[in-house]
Image (cartoon, rainbow, N blue to C red):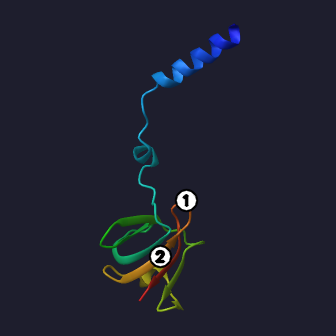
Amino acid sequence: MKKLALVVLAVTLLGASPPVDIHAAAGDLATERRVHGVITSIEPAKLTIASAQHVVTGRIDPARTKVTTNGRPAKLVDLKLTDHARGELCLDDVWLAIDTH
């Protein structure tokens, strides 16, 4: 009888909790791993690439982010606003690769 009361109590408490919006809990995390578009924002620690459908912002880690221009190695300072680019994000929203062309 006590086990049944505990189960009923647990179900009641779970049902009484307010619903959680999954999208709000995720914050601004990117949903796309590979992004193709135009560079719209460059900051020392962040870069934003926008396409016609969505905008993706990721962090820049100098040790992990590989930058190329037309397939050749480049530096972060070589990136320019309005450059056509494609990038690849890892799960913690750090750019792994950014290629401008």
Q: Mark 2 points at which residue?
A: 87
What amino acid type is highlighted by mark number 1?
Asp
Q: How many labels does the image show?
A: 2
Residue 46: percent from the left, percent from the top?
43, 66
Q: Please give the name of the residue rendered at 32% of the width and 79% of the height, measured from the top-left corner.
A: 81
The front one of 4 and 94 is 4
Question: Which quarter of the rendering shows the N terminus?
Answer: top right
Few, some or many residues within 10 Å of mark 1 (<14, 14–19, 20+): few
Q: Is residue 68 above or below residue 3?
A: below
Residue 101 occupies which quadrant of the picture?
bottom left
Residue on which the image places disc 1: 92
Q: Is mark 1 on a helix, strand or loop?
A: loop
Residue 54 locus on image (x, y percent): 34, 66
Report the side of 91 relative to 43 (left or right): right
Query: Between residues 62 and 4, which one lies in front from this camera angle?
Result: 4
| Residue 34 percent location from the top left of the image | 48, 72
Amino acid type, callout 2 = Gly
Coordinates of residue 29 in the picture (x, y in percent): 45, 56
**Which residue is at a point 42% across and 49% down the rendered structure image?**
27
Q: Distance between the residues labelled 2 and 1?
A: 14 Å
Query: Counting residues from the N terminus, which is met first, the one under dot 2 or under dot 1?
Result: 2
